[in-house]
Image (cartoon, rainbow, N blue to C red):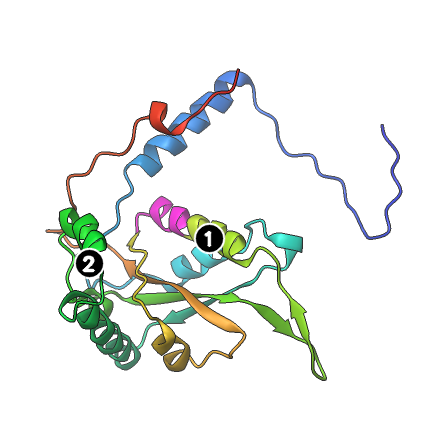
Amino acid sequence: MVTREHSYPFIPYRPERYPEEEMLRRGREFYELMDQRRSVRFFSDEPVPRECVELAVRTANTAPSGAHQQPWKFVVIGDAETKKRVREAAEAEERQNYEGGRLPADWREALAPLETTSDKAYLETVPWLVVCFAEKYEPRPGGGKRKHYYVNESVGIACGMFIAALHTMGLSTLTHTPNPMAFLTEICERPSNERPYILFPVGYAADDAEVPDLVRKPLSDVLIEMP
């Protein structure tokens, strides 16, 4: 047993270890589950327990972050009027993107197989909207700022874990990032040290939901093994 001296509190960490066969079984099962995940734009209005959303946020909150500063906030929206405001504001920006020519030609070409449009009706259909905000810094009592480090990386990991948690519970979502997203700061009444990161519609996929027939890159294209 190694004895170490610390300037800050430390506690023992003994994660469970599994036999090799069990490790592989668990890994394969998780991969197969996540391989079924798809971004959804056709949602049911069927109610979803709020606790499901809370569990997904709890899971996101376990993500690693720079200096353990956890620079994220998740705003949960369930009332119809606020969802309507979000939809109207998001569609106004998206009309500038799609019909107003704000999207460059190469970006429109990349989006073509997804057949996305400025219509975001699903933002009102779903039972929940969850907006993740990234905290650039933390205000200090009495004035001043505590800078946050690796904000984009940390919040991105947390959002990935949020998505995985929803899918594990049988729920669907979409990483909606209308640009610009300043309207979310206003609607969600967030302070200036936070910026909108991703808008997640959360609910069940509609019974007649469809998704583009896409193929993920094979492992050989994404796994590089060094000699």
Residue 194 in sight from this viewpoint: yes
The vertical placement of 126 against 211, above or below, is: below
Q: Secondary structure at mark 1?
A: helix
Which residue shows up at 59% across the image and 59% down it?
70
Q: Residue 183's image quarter?
A: bottom left
35 left or right, relative to 95? right
Amino acid type at mark 1:
Gly
Which one is in front, 216 or 6?
216
**Residue pointed to by mark 1:** 156
Which residue shows up at 72% across the image and 84% down it?
142
Q: CA distance from mark 2 to mark 1?
A: 24 Å
Q: Nearer the viewer, mark 2 or mark 1?
A: 1
41 left or right, relative to 3? left
Q: Residue 30's image quarter?
A: top left
Q: Residue 50's image quarter?
A: bottom left
28 left or right, relative to 94? right
12 left or right, relative to 213? right
Which residue shows up at 26% across the image and 45% down it?
38
Which of marks 1 and 2 precedes in the sequence? 2
Q: Is residue 166 found inside the magenta-colored segment of the image? A: yes
Q: Position of residue 92 (x, y in %)?
A: 21, 76
Q: Position of residue 226 (x, y in %)?
A: 51, 20
Q: Position of residue 213 (x, y in %)?
A: 15, 39
Magenta segment range? 163-171
Q: Return the residue found at the far bottom.
A: 142
The mark found on residue 43 in the picture is 2
The vertical placement of 62 against 54, above or below, is: above
Q: Secondary structure at mark 2?
A: loop
Dominant secondary structure of the magenta stretch? Answer: helix
Q: Position of residue 119 (x, y in %)?
A: 15, 67
